[in-house]
Amino acid sequence: MNQLPNTEIRFVSLVRTEMKICALAVLGAAALAGHILVADVGTATRTLPGFSLLPAAKCDQSRNVRQCLVARPKEWSAEDRGAIQDAMRRLTAHELVRGILVGAKENGYAGLQRFSTYAEQDPARGPVATFNPGFVLYASKVIGITDAFFQTAAVRDPISDYRFGDLILVHELVHAFDNGRGSSEPGFTVVAGWVFKDNRWQYANRVSFSEYLGVYAATLTLNASGRYGEAWARDRSFATSMTFPLPTIQALASPDESFADILAHLIIDSRASTYLKPEVVGWFEKNVFPALRAKAGNFAPADFDLF
């Protein structure tokens, strides 16, 4: 789901217009892909109990000071807090979201931290500010939320009318819950169309490269002019109508992005099961939902300073 940010995706191997994608390398931060190769940009100023809206990171404590300075940590404003709290109250009405929160906390995640932007590590230029609503800092166990989140949170999905901000929160929480485990299980990678070959993950299902490029170019133009809803509609229309339908083209980036994109949509998109393949829906219903429901039984609002 990489159409809200200014993201570049490189197809490593191209054979023909109608082709199987051999690999996708995310070079810029996608709306939901900032967590793929992100370095740690800072740590919380103090330890808080439970899972919280954390204080601003301190760049002088960061493993990558330059990247932290580009991301520009900031404190939560009262308006920011209100928006996140309203969203979390709405989302935790869903049993599976409660289970995801418990799982993220069990994995050691401390909460959400505020940044001005996302700092993508470019091999040639170093850290580059990139439009990206949310990302995961695996080392410091926090989820980053940027200004872009609040700029796009109210965008409505053209298929199911969910809020884009809700999707971002659930998607990033899924990454914290998954921690690279479920998304790398052979059962998931097989059913989702991923194969590990030549020392990298490759997407094996057929995708029209020419159509993808057209959609991608259009969404970049729309995003650049602030027409986020239109860009999102183009992404969703293309992804859900592919031969092997996916929620968004972000699911083409890597197995962990597929896992987070699909699971997040199965939770908040009331129509997800109508366009996803039955075997994909069935895998999550059998292998993920029971564990989340069990974890939801341990959910205690007092453990989450988000409400």
Image (tube, rainbow, N blue to C red):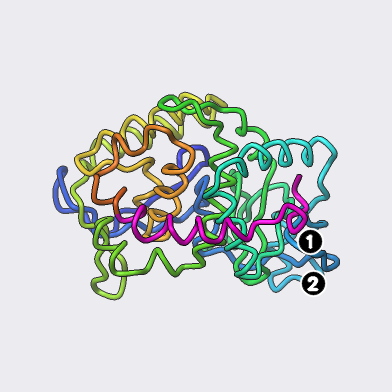
Which amino acid type is marked by label 1? Ala
Question: Going 71% across and 58% down the picture, which residue do you hit?
Answer: 111
Residue 272 screen position, x and y as percent: 36, 37
Mark 1 vs 2: CB contact within 8 A: yes
Q: Which mark is residue 61?
A: 2
Residue 235 screen position, x and y as percent: 39, 34
Which amino acid type is marked by label 2? Gln
Tell me the chief SS of the magenta region.
Answer: helix
In the rendered structure, the answer to whether residue 289 lies left or right of residue 87 reads left
Camera-side residue of 192 and 6: 192
Q: Which residue is mark 1?
A: 57
Residue 275 screen position, x and y as percent: 29, 36
Q: Against 190, is 89 above or below?
A: above
Question: Going 51% across and 49% down the picture, which residue do you hit?
Answer: 32
Residue 288 screen position, x and y as percent: 41, 58
Tell me the SS state at disc 1.
Answer: loop
Question: Going 59% across and 57% down the picture, which residue do you hit?
Answer: 297
In the rendered structure, the answer to whether residue 121 lies left or right of residue 151 reads left
Q: Which residues are magenta?
A: 283-307
Q: CA distance from mark 1 to mark 2?
A: 8 Å
Q: Against 227, is 80 above or below?
A: below
Q: Against 69, is 170 above or below?
A: above
